[in-house]
Image: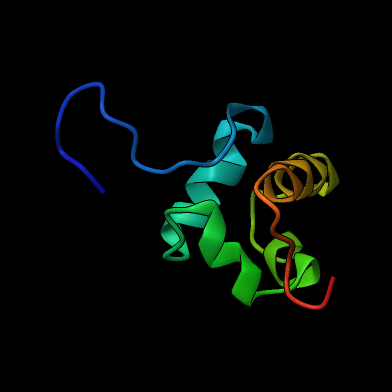
């Protein structure tokens, strides 16, 4: 995570929502590519991540040619 004002702490889409983005950062994830090592169900189990966030993250991963583990 960067301490520079205005610099992003992650590359997750804003549409995922702040609670979900915070939960992902708290779990140690800072970039979309890291989500390819976990399943959508594992991410959904994080407090603050709901079905809407999973859909947004899934779309963002697909746009990069990536997917959650097992998809």
Lateral position of residue 21 relative to residue 58, left or right: left
Look at the picture and state if 44 lies above or below 49: below
Residue 10 image offset from top left, x and y in percent:
41, 43
| Count of marks overlaid on the render | 0
Question: How is colour applied across the structure in the image?
Answer: rainbow
Residue 60 image offset from top left, x and y in percent:
69, 42
Look at the picture and state if 8 lies above or below 68: above
Q: Residue at x 70, y 46 (%)?
A: 57
User: For residue 33, which quarter of the picture?
Assistant: bottom right
Residue 64 image offset from top left, x and y in percent:
65, 47
User: For residue 53, which quarter of the picture?
Assistant: top right
Residue situated furthest top in the rendering: 6
Look at the picture and state if 37 lies above or below 52: below
Q: Quadrant of the C terminus?
A: bottom right
Residue situated furthest front in the rendering: 65
User: For residue 69, which quarter of the picture?
Assistant: bottom right
Lateral position of residue 2 relative to residue 69, left or right: left
Q: Residue at x 72, y 72 (%)?
A: 42
Q: Residue at x 26, y 29 (%)?
A: 7
Look at the picture and state if 7 lies above or below 55: above
Residue 5 image offset from top left, x and y in percent:
18, 24
Residue nearer the viewer, 64 or 71? 64
Q: Residue at x 61, y 44 (%)?
A: 20
Residue nearer the viewer, 23 or 54? 54
């Amino acid at each position: 995570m960067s301490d520079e004002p205005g610099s992003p702490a992650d590359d997750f889409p804003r549409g995922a929502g702040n609670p979900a983005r915070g939960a992902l950062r708290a779990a140690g994830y800072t970039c979309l590519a890291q989500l390819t090592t976990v399943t959508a169900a594992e991410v959904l189990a994080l407090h603050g991540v709901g079905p809407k966030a999973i859909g947004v993250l899934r779309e963002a991963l697909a746009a990069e040619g990536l997917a959650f583990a097992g998809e």
